[in-house]
Amino acid sequence: MKLYIVKEGNYKSNWKVKESLAFKTRKALHDYMGKKLGFKCVRSDDAYSVKGNRFVNTANHYGYDIIPLELYSSE
């Protein structure tokens, strides 16, 4: 099972993990962030992030990375 957490921040600050929530799907994460921020971010591949995991909004100088976590059963 995979869960997704978000690392977010302003372009001028160091991005940090700010949410204490984990999401079961990328879509749920994007929907939550869109509601929280009041604007959407679009995919933006660059040399500083894993391909497909960085999303930015250049007009608002803000963005977030998706951090996928693989969960394993301890049983």
Image: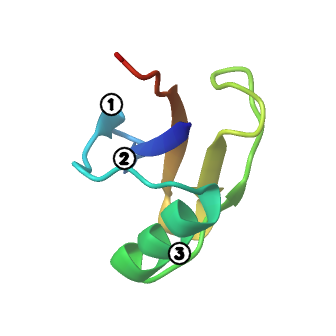
Residue 56 lies in what quarter of the image?
A: bottom right
Choose mark 2 or mark 3, whichever is in front. 3
Q: Viewer-proximal residue, 30 or 64?
A: 30
Q: Position of residue 61 (x, y in %)?
A: 49, 58
Residue that label 2 marks: 9
Q: Is residue 35 above or below residue 9?
A: below
Write the residue at 49% across / 48% down: 64
Q: What secondary structure is found at the residue carrying circle 2? A: strand
Q: Viewer-proximal residue, 18 or 28?
A: 28
- Is mark 1 in CB contact (under 8 Å) with mark 2? yes
- N-term-proximal mark, 2 vs 3: 2
Write the residue at 61% across / 56% down: 26
Mark number, residue 61: none
Circle 2: residue type: Gly
- Is mark 2 in CB contact (under 8 Å) with mark 3? no
Residue that label 3 marks: 31
Label 3, label 1: how far apart the Cα atoms are: 23 Å
Mark number, residue 14: 1
Q: Position of residue 53 (x, y in %)?
A: 66, 39
Write the residue at 51% across / 52% down: 63
